[in-house]
Image: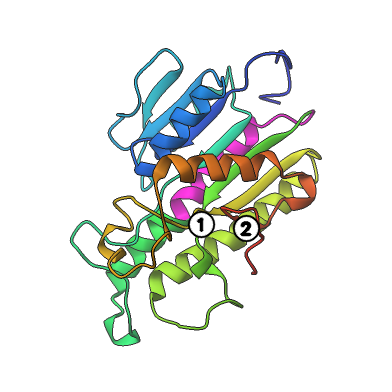
Amino acid sequence: MPGDEGKDTNARPVAAVFGASGGIGRSLCEVLAERGCHPIYAGSRRGVGPDGPDFRRFAFDLTDEGSIQNAAAMMRDDPPDLVIVATGVLTLEDGTGPERTLKRLDAGAMAQVLALNTIGPALIAKHILPLMPRDRRFVFAALSARVGSISDNGLGGWHSYRASKAALNMLLKNFALEMGRTHAEGIVVGLHPGTVDSALSQPFQKGLPEGQLTQPMQAATNLLRVLDALSPKDSGKVFDFAGVQVPA
């Protein structure tokens, strides 16, 4: 199987970041480089991202499975040990934001949110998880959100975004169970980064309590620290930036 053979376990760890041009994604790439990862596959919709000898940039589109399949093929000969899907949308390109009431639901907008927040990451998992090693630890993580928790939902609203993240969390659980049958040391998880100073959160930063907004580099450091501490028994769960499990 791809990823099972020819890997020097003393070699520098290999990482992949889908969404490397965003605030969190770019910062994840930079912190991973500081940690000595090489190569770091850095993917974005336009193929832009961090420069340097550690990075292998590639283009992919969450709504184009062929582009995701091509990215996986590029990694086949030197597959990553750590994969982070650092993508997500809260406000669409046309300015459509999260619905505060059911009267604002729109089928087209809802379909776009689900395509980007749920289906796209699932297709990345479809093509990347088969590359993962069976004989050692690997981590596949996707950015989720606390608002995707059903039991923790006390406010309602933000219907499409909440639904897309809840569905993503269910898929990550499914993938964790499936991979666990053949990859005993594998970890598949969701990550809640908190409120990060990025393009996604900028329209909603007004009125935030002091200290609640996290800078991207700090967020990246927090998330990687959480991943460092996880074990296979944590697979299928969602954790926040402090390592606390987010309820389902």
Measured Cα–Cα span from mark 1 to mark 2: 8 Å
Image position, residue 14 (x, y; %): 58, 23
Q: Residue at x 30, y 65 (%)?
A: 204
Q: Quadrant of residue 115?
A: bottom left
Q: Quadrant of the N terminus?
A: top right
**Mark 2: secondary structure:** strand
Mark number displayed over residue 144: 1
Whether residue 74 can be seen here: no
Query: Are circles 1 and 2 on residues that touch, CB within 8 Å?
Result: yes
Helix, strand or loop at label 1? It is loop
User: On screen, 220 above or below 213?
Assistant: above
Residue at image point 34% right, 51% down: 197
Q: Quadrant of the C terminus?
A: bottom right
Tell me the number on the disc at residue 60.
Answer: none
In the image shown, does 228 or 44 lie closer to the viewer? Answer: 228
The crowd level at tag 2 (other Cα within 10 Å; few <14, some 14-19, many 20+) is many
Please state which amino acid type lies under the numbered disc 1.
Answer: Ser
Provide the major secondary structure of the magenta segment. helix
Numbered label tally: 2
Q: Within 10 Å of the Cα at label 1, are there few (<14), some (14-19), or many (20+) other Cα atoms? A: many
Decide if residue 135 is on the left or right side of residue 87.
right
Indicate yes or no whether the magenta region holds residue 123: yes
Residue 238, labelled with which disc? 2
Magenta region: 119-135
Residue type, label 2? Val
Instruction: Tell me, yes or no, whether the highlighted magenta stretch contains residue 201.
Output: no
Q: Could you tell me which residue is drawn at 53 percent across and 79 percent down?
A: 153
Compared to residue 209, the image places residue 12 above or below, namely above
In the shown orientation, is residue 110 left or right of residue 130? left
| Place of residue 77 in the rendered image (x, y in percent of width and height, measured from the top left) | 58, 17
Residue 224 visible? The answer is: yes
